[in-house]
Image: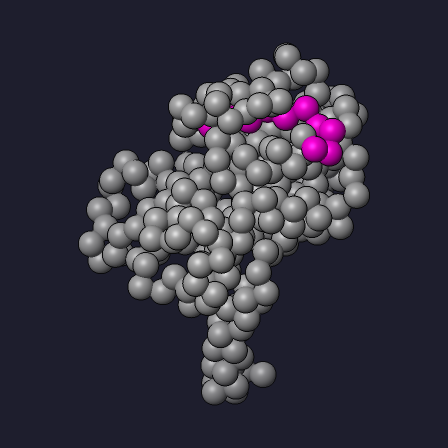
Amino acid sequence: MIDYSGQVALVTGGASGIGLALGRALCARGARVVLADIAPELDAVAAGMRAVHADLADPATAERLVADIYATEGRLDLIASNAGVGYRKRLLKADFSDPAIARLFEINSFAAFRFAQAWLPRLESAGQHGRLLITGSENSLSVPDAVRRFWLGLYAASKHSVLILAEWLREELEANGAPLTLHMLLPGGVYTGMTRDGLPADPAQWPPHMGIITPERCADIALAGIDADRFHIPTHPHLADDMRARAESVAQTLDLLALR
């Protein structure tokens, strides 16, 4: 188990849900935590943590946050790039010039890599090592059964893209021996602001087929995955099952076309 005593962590999307749970879990392990979010309730929930109001839809925010933390804390050891927004609309009815779609991809897909660009030179110059935890989704891997007919195509595209970008960035970092380790958190159903509409407040009444877990359980899994130095950190066993249909379809077509 990693001891975060004396270390500094930045958690985005920290006003609620997975981000707040990660912040509290890191605090419990001894980290000095900076919570960043655009939500006005951030200050009220950031007990024991430093609150910074920031909008990750602005491409310049990542650099500003990293620079601010180095100026105030003197170091930065972990970034949890967790901020995310939802988007539900049928693809055939989507207006792809909608600014909300650009915002969706800026926050869900690109923010983590803006952090890497701003942070890595500072790690290298200080001779320090960092860890970047990126929150993807079960939608990064497949079309999960539990959310079919939810019209999540564009949201899922943003989460697909953040996964493949992270896999390519991992290759770049390893090729150059860079002092930055990546981790991809892949949550299934978590009781957060994006999922709780229509769900009862009592966890005992959550539909069993959805496999909903608490943000605290998700944070525990995330930190356990980091402890184990894993890149992919899924929270639910069905994530492996959901990917199988794609792999089987590719294999069946290879056989049909006599390509193997």
- The magenta stretch spans which residues? 28-37
227 is higher (above) or lower (below) than 55: below
173 is higher (above) or lower (below) than 61: below
Residue 107: give x, y in percent of width and height. Answer: 43, 37
Q: Outermost residue, top direction?
A: 71
Instruction: Please tell me whether residue 214 belongs to the stretch shown in magenta.
Output: no
Which residue: 69% across, 50% down? 225
Front residue of 162/229: it is: 229
Place residue 77 in its image quadrant: top right
224 is higher (above) or lower (below) than 39: below
Quarter of the image with the N terminus in it: top right
Quarter of the image with the C terminus in it: bottom right
Residue 227 seen in the current view: yes
Residue 125: give x, y in percent of width and height. Answer: 74, 22
Residue 187: give x, y in percent of width and height. Answer: 53, 52
Left or right, 81 with respect to 153, comes to: right
Which residue: 44% across, 40% down? 84
Left or right, 223 with respect to 34, comes to: right
Q: Main secondary structure of the magenta part?
A: strand
Residue 61 seen in the current view: no
